[in-house]
Image (cartoon, coloured by chain):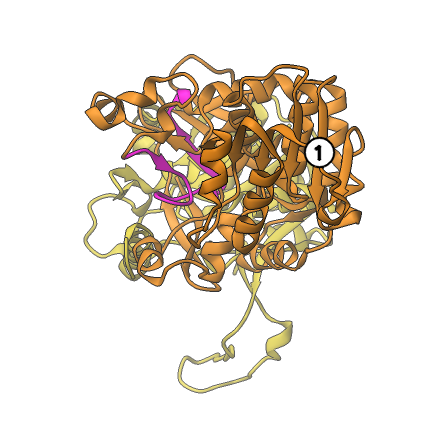
Amino acid sequence: MNIALILAAGTGSRMGNADKPKQFLLVQNKPLMIHTIEVFDVNPNIDKIVISTNEEYVEEVKLMIKQYDLTKVAKVVAGGATRQISVYNGLQGCKEIGAKDDDIIVIHDSARPLISPRIIKDNIECCKAYGAVDTVIKATDTIVKSEDSETISDIPVRKELYQGQTPQTFKFSLIMQAHDAVKNKEVPNVTDDTKLVLLLGHKVHLVEGDKLNFKITTFDDLMMLKALLKIGKAEVL
Amino acid sequence: MFQLLYKVTSPGVIEEFIDTVDLESNKVLVKVDYMAICKADIRYFLGLRDPAILNQKYPLAPIHEAVGHVVKDDTGKYQIGDKVILIPNSVEEKYLNEFENQRCARTDLGNNYAIHSTFRSSSTDGFLKQFYVAEPELLVKYDSKIPANIAVFSELLSVAVAGLRRIIFSETNHVAIFGDGILAYITYIVFRHDHPDTKLTVYGIDKNKLSMFKECETKTYEEYNGEKYDTMIEIVGGKYSADAINKMIDMATVGADLILMGVSEEKVPLNTRLVLEKGLSLKGVTRSDNKDFEHVAKLLEEKEVQDKIRPMILSEVQINSVNDIYDAYKKDIENKTTIGKNVMKW
């Protein structure tokens, strides 16, 4: 079984004065997260969907699932204060709907609505072979490292650098093991699940992402998405 | 949800656009599986039409030959997973009552000749996208055992069916097809299936291509030795249309039917004196109707039909980016020697 775990527990703190988390903002009269979930809902490689969202929005999300006729959503769980807790709770949700050790969990940000079916397919195929997958794009800008935020401490070799996206995809047993290993521990500098898997000493393979699979984090990102949609509707450019 | 849609924006240029996919009520959401490039798509891509017309068309998503499977259905007509042929032409009901469209009700003609009818990839965006929201009547279900890379030839088959539907046959007629291209071959497949015992001759210029027409007589024009034909089907098109149609007029019996299916951008001078003298009928056919697609879905179930279509799959091009679409166009444009297409799949 292939389960999509959709993370929709962000606070939208980088969205200025928005009164709702970014994943609930309406784009083309539909919440952003619904656009994202629909891609998984109609994908033949996905069997079930689990959504991890803010505790206060669980009931609203359940209502939206009915309203938008999402047929594969099997569980909505309350996330937590950090990404790590939200994923962990989502994995518990996967367990409750019957996830087995060899099942594949495709973890994706609800704020990346331009995820393509090709990326989902590549994630699942690569995960079947290697057990752990990260979606990345090659860094095109030079990345500068600064330890004091004032001066450059290093300029890493660009060809070795990639920008991480989601999905991140794992065999269920592996990602559970990775989370159990750090459960109730404060693990510094962990921003995603691949880091936890690396801490176990397990290799994580790369799948090519897409620049369009960007995350809607700020108003600038939202403006970019809306601009792309307007261009798509233009009769004459 | 959102998806990528690809449009030709100017001659030789295909660009990516973001498209919103909304499953409206009483519609069906289809995942497009296979697509094929038509000669008309190539003409739009290369800019081989009147610039004034092209400027009105661009930007335009190409492709009107496609098959897919149902992923959601708000109509109750389809099951999830049903394999379907996408019908590219449609006309709104309100236009059918207009005086100039009333003749379309004739069963041999069909609604797709109506003024204001739309055709995907010509008057509206085509199927070059992963998901398509369709009216249920613009889909025809086909047997799931039929390979999708064969079913993608359905639109061409439907045009051949429409062409043959316009002819009143007597099985004793001697029939000739003029042309050795893909639509000629497809028409040969349909004709041979529907009329296995009728005498058929195919005229062409390329002996290699003619060798694919195995179950009939084939000839180059130089090999013509004075036979007369009761029914002739022109599928040459382009700049050689005039030569082919005038040869047909010469070879026609008195009262013969001439079916014109080749598209030409030029006006074609014809020997009308001989048309009058022989009392010939000329009928134009390029537009198929829903019932033609339904006939095709049945035809595709026949193993012998599938076996004849299979050699036309020259390659399968996996589309992951706009570059792959360019590659598929390039392959089809450069292919001058083999009957077939480089079919695209998502």
Q: Quick one: quadrant of the N terminus of chain B? A: top left
Question: Which image quadrant is residue A170 in?
Answer: top right
In the rendering, at what x and y percent does residue B121 appear?
42, 44
Residue at numbered disc 1: B227
Q: List the single residue furthest toward the front.
A: B277
> Count of labels shown?
1
Residue at 29% over, 40% down: A24
Under mark 1, the amino acid is Glu
In the rendering, at what x and y percent does residue B92 appear?
28, 26
Instruction: Answer whether residue A91 is visible to the viewer in this image.
Output: no
Instruction: Answer whether residue B187 is visible to the viewer in this image.
Output: yes
Say if B11 sits above or below B259 in the image. Answer: below
In the rendering, at what x and y percent does residue B337 appear?
73, 54
Say if A109 sits above or below B135 in the image. Answer: below
Question: Which image quadrant is residue A23 in?
Answer: top left
Letter of the yellow chain: A
Residue at 34% over, 36% down: B118
The reply to whether the magenta stretch includes residue B117 is yes
Residue at 68% over, 18% down: B195
Residue numbers of the magenta segment:
B116-137
In front of the other: A160 or A40:
A40
Letter of the orange chain: B
Say if B218 sits above or below B263 in the image. Answer: above
Dot 1 falls on a residue whose secondary structure is loop
> Mark 1 — on which chain does it sit?
B
Examine the residues drawn in magenta and state their main secondary structure. loop
In front of the other: B52 or B329:
B52
In the rendering, at what x and y percent does residue B340 appear?
69, 44
The reply to whether the magenta stretch includes residue A145 is no
